Amino acid sequence: MLNKLLVIFRKDFLTARRDAMATYIIVIPLILAVGISFFAPGLNDTTVKLAMLESDDTEHIEYMKQFAQVELFDSLDELERRVKKRDDIAAIAPNGHSYEIVLQGNESEMVEDYVLMLSAYYELGATKDETNAQLLSFGRTVPPLKTKLVNILVLLTIMLAGMLIAMSIVEEKAENTINAINVTPISQTAFVAGKSLFGSTAAMLGIIGAILITGFYDINWFMIIIVGLTSMILSLVIGFLQGLSSEDVMEAAGSVKLLFLPIAGSIAVYEFVADKWQWTMYWSPFYWAYKANTMILSKTADWGTVLLCTGMVVGLSLIVYLVSIPKIRKGLS
């Protein structure tokens, strides 16, 4: 049985290497993970931007970098052109023995007040060590936006696993090997398992790679793998159904994209809807997967909650699978 599964896995792997779209689907989670690493702000990153001259005093520049995102320019003309762009940014430029603040005039009041305050503190020689303020922590150690983006990427990767399955099934139909299964030693169950093996392996490697690239090294990996594997059940079932009912690769890929709807709905309800309305998405396995991954990535997960979420994912996915078995068997006949 295992040898038969590996034969199917090897065939799918070799086919994917020759297929540009399949290769793209496998690689895209890693590319998106790199983008998240570069552009997602850190927990303590400020969003206030300052434009300054490279010729300015080094001590002044380093002081401002502690409290704002500093962009350096060669000349005053470049500095003014930067300030005139559409985003909120202020400039601090030398003016004799003092400094002047350059504004376009439509910046938010917060930016203007913040830059004025920073400039005044610099003139007074104030430092962070001299402050009397107390730092209170709410225990959050992971940037919330980065957690959300990585969690969304995990669900996207799971959806792509279904797309790989659908494309592989269409390829089998084009080669007329679907009907040949019935006269080979490979049973329909082994064929389904073998096809699922490649899709789930590619997705799990993508998930693990994306999480490592984005810097979540010290999470509970056993939890994240369990949630990922169970979440793929529904995606793989949809992949089989759409692959068997589609005539070409583009139709199969487009049909699997319907999974975007429950994924997007699950994320929107979890993030933006009040607690009393969370039950409206309890029917979606992706809701429970997103909830579990959020706690795992933010390092607040406990086994009781993770097992509850995983159980809901498995239960809801198995309902869809049991309903779909007759259609899958008919398509493979």
Image (cartoon, helix red, strand yellow):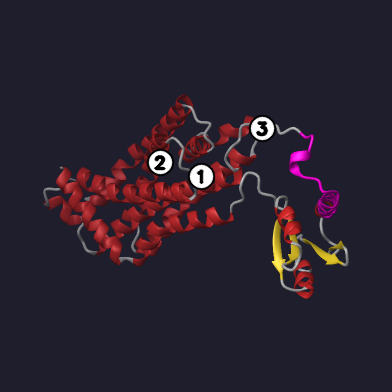
**Residue 87, located in which quarter of the rendered image?**
bottom right
Say what secondary structure mark 1 lies in.
helix
**Residue 167, located in which quarter of the rendered image?**
bottom left
Q: Residue at x 39, y 62 (%)?
A: 24
Q: What residue is disc 3 on?
A: 137
Left or right: where 218 falls relative to 321: right
Q: Position of residue 49 (x, y in %)?
A: 73, 58
Q: Earlier in the sequence, mark 1 or mark 3?
A: 3
The three-letter code of the residue at mark 2 reads Gly
Mostly what secondary structure, the magenta segment? Answer: helix
State how far apart marks 1 and 2 are (Cα).
11 Å
The three-letter code of the residue at mark 1 reads Asn
Q: Which of 126/136 is in front?
A: 126
Eye-nearest disc, 3 or 2: 3
Left or right: where 115 falls relative to 141: right
Q: Earlier in the sequence, mark 3 or mark 2?
A: 3
Q: Position of residue 208 (x, y in %)?
A: 40, 46
Q: What residue is disc 1 on?
A: 151
Q: Position of residue 312 (x, y in %)?
A: 44, 31
Q: Which residues are magenta?
A: 112-133
Residue 285 visible at all: yes
